[in-house]
Amino acid sequence: MKTFFGGAFIEKEKLEEAGIDYPIKLEYYKQINEDEIISNNKAKYGISIIKTEYIPNNLKVETKNIRYITNEEFEINRILNIFKDNQVTLINSEEVISDLFRNKF
């Protein structure tokens, strides 16, 4: 099960710096792995990220699911807030999570 946590359009200035002239929206979802926690003893919470590119005459949607990040809801909420505030994309999401756990937030 996943629930919407938050979303944002990437700032126009950042897009212009990258040479992109169309809007990009990021959405972040808290993923709860209830079925597998009982049988596999794995972490309960994960993250889903949806990136939507509004290219003229075309809509491009990409999704990334990162499962089994933590058993603690407050930690996943903290990670999701960091993702939302910093507009973390699909490409660097796993690296950001590694850095956060290495630095203990």
Image (cartoon, rainbow, N blue to C red):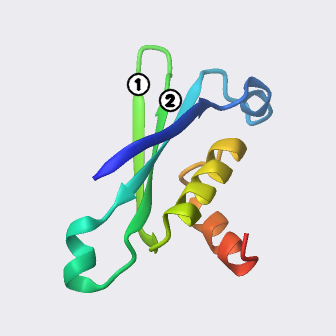
Element carrying mark 1 = loop
Q: 2 and 86: which one is in front?
A: 2
Let me know if residue 92 appears in the view: no
Asked if the residue under mark 2 is in contact with the one under mark 1, i.e. CB atoms within 8 Å, the reply is yes
Amino acid type, residue under disc 1 in the picture: Leu
Question: Which comes before the other along the chain, label 1 or label 2?
Answer: 2
Please tell me which residue lies in front, 23 or 44.
44
Badge 1: how crowded within 10 Å, few (<14), some, or many (20+)? few
- Please, what secondary structure does the residue beneath circle 2 have? strand
Q: Amino acid at mark 2?
A: Glu
Say which residue appears at 49% left-offset and 15% top-offset.
Answer: 56
Task: Tell me: residue 87, above or below residue 32.
Answer: above
Q: Residue at x 57, y 29 (%)?
A: 24
- Name the residue at 70% across, 72% down: 99
Q: Along the horizontal axis of the image, is 66 left or right of 100?
A: left
* 3D distance between C-alphas at marks 1 and 2: 6 Å
Task: In the rendered view, tell whether residue 24 sits above or below residue 4.
Answer: above
> What crowding class fits label 2: few (fewer than 14 Cα within 10 Å), some (14-19), or many (20 or more)?
some
Residue 83 lies, in percent from the top left, at 63, 50
Residue 20 x, y percent position in the rendering: 67, 28
**What label sits on residue 59 in the rendered view?**
1
**Which x, y percent locates residue 101?**
66, 76
Q: Which mark is residue 13?
A: none
Q: Which part of the image, by quadrant, shows the C terminus?
A: bottom right
Left or right: 85, with 38 as reference point: right
Residue at screen point 40% across, 76% down: 43
Left of 92 or right of it: where is 99?
right
Q: How many marks?
A: 2
Closest to the observer, 101 or 52: 101
Q: Is residue 10 visible?
A: yes
Residue where numbered disc 2 is placed: 53
Q: Quadrant of residue 16?
A: top right
